[in-house]
Image (cartoon, rainbow, N blue to C red):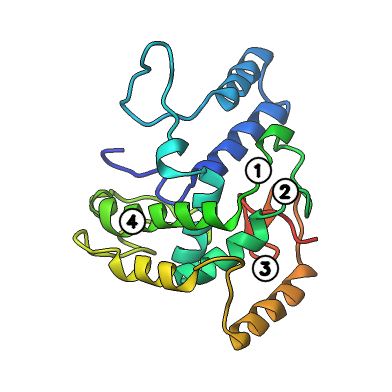
Amino acid sequence: MSHYAVNASVPKTLIRHLVGWMARNGQLDWNVRETLEDILRSQMTPELIPASEGKTVSAEDTVGPYELQDFNLYYLSRFGFRPSKVAFLAFHAWSRRGQGTWPSSIPEVERREYDLVVIKRWLGVFIQRFFQSSQFKRSALPNGPKVGSGGSLSPRGDWRAPSDATADAWLKELRSGVRSGQPSLPHRQLSQASGRHRRSARKCRGPSSRRCKAGGRASTSRRQCR
């Protein structure tokens, strides 16, 4: 890490998918596969925080569900959508667990859904941490590869931001744009989003990805279009 940032554009959901793929593809012996499966069954914990009285601390209790936050990261960093639009897409992608097709690699117990209140709450946490609390760490990243089309945070490529930025403008837009009930978009933008979905629905492929029903863009953490 001191000389090369191997995970500058690899979100945690993609890492879990790759570990699971390695455990199932038959190229490794039994002991290695069992170790990888054990890693997948383990709870992800914050760095450098030891277990207290035999109980581990869940990182998702602090930063939010990884699949939801990686979804937010993709649409904010890849397209620059404002928070209310990201909430709109997240609501239609995650509000109904039984709608759409899940990859077979995701166990039944990990197929979760989120209502608008939860989506707005964790999107606010993401914005605060992403724009205001954590940029100083990304500004010091060494060189690293670009792996995916969205979420690449290398300061020498896709993402450039000041370390002393504030998240106030983004949080204000989230509060004003997502009040209660179902998040809404202006009529023109809603029509454009629907048109993109119709065009992209014909292209939805791949058992290893979830695609946003509203946007139709491929990502490891999104459900496939119906």
67 or 121, which lies in front?
121
Contact check, label 2 and label 4, Cβ < 8 Å:
no
Residue 149, position as x, y percentages in the image: 53, 61
Which tag is nearer the camera, tag 3 or tag 1? 1
Distance between the Cα atoms at labels 2 and 1?
Answer: 6 Å
- Residue that sits furthest to the front in the current view: 180
Contact check, label 4 and label 1, Cβ < 8 Å:
no
Distance between the Cα atoms at labels 3 and 2?
Answer: 15 Å
Amino acid type for the residue under numbered disc 3: Ala
- Image quadrant holding the C terminus, namely bottom right
Distance between the Cα atoms at labels 4 and 3?
Answer: 25 Å
Task: Say what secondary structure mark 3 lies in.
Answer: loop
Amino acid type for the residue under numbered disc 1: Arg
Q: Which residue is mark 2?
A: 97
Q: Earlier in the sequence, mark 2 or mark 4?
A: 2
Q: Is residue 217 left or right of residue 13?
A: right
Q: Which residue is mark 1?
A: 112
Q: Which residue is mark 3?
A: 214
Amino acid type for the residue under numbered disc 4: Gln
Q: Earlier in the sequence, mark 3 or mark 2?
A: 2
110 or 152, which lies in front?
110
Seen in the picture, residue 134 relative to 213 is either above or below; the reply is above
Report the residue at 53% width, 55% height from top. 117
Amino acid type for the residue under numbered disc 2: Arg
Q: Which residue is mark 4?
A: 128
145 or 35, which lies in front?
35
Q: Earlier in the sequence, mark 4 or mark 3?
A: 4
Task: Say what secondary structure mark 4 lies in.
Answer: helix
